[in-house]
Image (cartoon, helix red, strand yellow):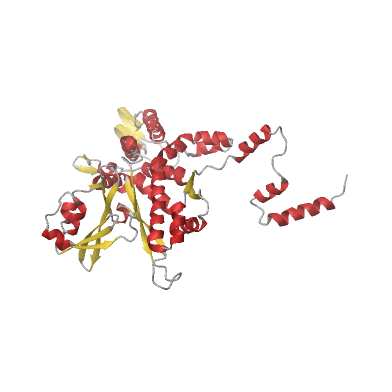
Amino acid sequence: MADELQQNEIDRTDIKSLLIAGLVDEAKALFSTRKDKVEEALKQWNVSTHKVHDRPKKYVESKEVPQAKLPLPYQKKIVSSAVAFLFGKPVKLIQLSSNTDNAFKMIDNLWTDMRMGSKNRKNARTVFSQTAAAKMFVEYKDVDANGNGTFNSIKCILISKDNGNDLYTKKDQYGVMYSIARGYSSKIGDRVIEHFDAEFNDIIVRCKKVDGIWLVVPENNLAKKIRFSYYEQDQTEWDDVQELIERQEMLISKRADNNDYTADSILVLTGDVESLPDKEETGKVVKLKGEGASAKYLSPQMAIDMVKDERTTLDNYILYFTDTPDLSSEQLKSMGQDSGKALEMKFFPAILKAMDKLEVFEEMIDREINILKAMITNIIDVSPAMATEIKNLRIGYQFGNPLPDNVKDFLEMLSTAAGGKSIMSRKTAVEQNPLIKDADAENKLIDAEEMSSPIE
């Protein structure tokens, strides 16, 4: 295939043709990448690279004065809250079609085996903090489950800058993903090998640079579908308040400097000093002599309240404009007295933010289910019966948030609607009791106790 492309004129607008011909650098230039944005986002995410560390040095009489450089991990708090409200409870798959039990069970089992609950949280954390990430699904041979050496399972691998990958994407004029690639490096001895793997619906082109030359190996894509789900958002979760965070860090660092310089009282003496007390003495006295001699303590004349007010305002703005709940100790104390509905309303901005994120995450979960369907029918189970079930299978899903279910208020509403009459049998109530392991046995014990009780 490569020889044919070498003999004919190469279409330099087609990524696949360029890659197969070994013109990898030309092909890479046709991809879109968020590499620079991701690197800048990681600088803001990691406290060790915050701008406050770049405070200009200060000198007094040619001597450098130490300065506090105190980064604040607001970015981690904002992202942690966003992840919790989106994936606080694992996504639950729901079968919406009939006569597709085998196909649904296979996908549900794969979903569990791949630990997608954990993968979703980790992936969301990466997307929110780096603006781009991907999941790669790969066929897998589980020898313990199947000793004949064929692919019988699927694994999910998270792809991001954190694990050494740069992501590249190319979409057609309709916005459909034409190819997705990842650039990464491996080390053999003292040599660092550069890799660039691009995936298309029909082939996977694996490229590696050895001694400055790209070696290309095309291989068939067994899934017959790009096995990546690619997540992207325009900016980090904290981007709109980044300047406020930097201002807050500078204020708290300067406040720490002032504390270091002036927190301990400074005794100022004017005139001749006759004697100073030893540190062990009690009832210490400073003796001065001469006209105009005096002693006083120097204390800083600073607008402490103004600085404190600005820091409080900045904190409120940072949390408000990112829809991040305030979980300070004072707020938590008041929440303990709230009803379930009131508690939900306090967190409503964060819930709305999570609902807004569903635009991307629902679409990607749909894609991931379709990837699993393609890999099952083309690799794992190629039987006609499975192909039919997979084709007819319809899967829904349910997201959750970390707030406790508002069961009490809901039951009270139902009871009111029923005129105060019972809305649940004792048997059902016992079955719903989380403290009871065997509901049937418990109901029998209750019946026995009621029968043995004396009639009044």
Task: Work out which residue is located at the far bottom of the displayed protein and give it.
Answer: 147
Place residue 116 in its image quadrant: bottom left
Q: Is residue 272 left or right of residue 387?
A: left
- Check the picture and name the quadrant holding the C terminus: top right
Q: Position of residue 95 (x, y in %)?
A: 51, 50
Q: Position of residue 316 (x, y in %)?
A: 41, 33
Q: Is residue 64 left or right of residue 300?
A: left
Place residue 315 in its image quadrant: top left
Q: Position of residue 351 (x, y in %)?
A: 47, 38
| Residue 325 seen in this snapshot | no
Q: Is residue 317 above or below residue 278?
A: above
Closer to the camera, 319 or 286?
319
Closer to the camera, 151 or 295?
151
Q: Is residue 9 left or right of residue 256?
A: left
Report the number of numbered marks. Answer: 0
- Check the picture and name the quadrant holding the N terminus: bottom left
Q: Is residue 431 above or below residue 316?
A: below
Q: Position of residue 203 (x, y in %)?
A: 27, 58
State the residue at coordinates (58%, 39%). 406
State the residue at coordinates (18%, 52%). 27
| Residue 119 seen in this snapshot | yes
State the residue at coordinates (36%, 40%). 237
Closer to the camera, 182 or 304?
182
Task: Work out which residue is located at the far top of the displayed protein and give it.
Answer: 292
Q: Is residue 87 above or below residue 113?
A: above
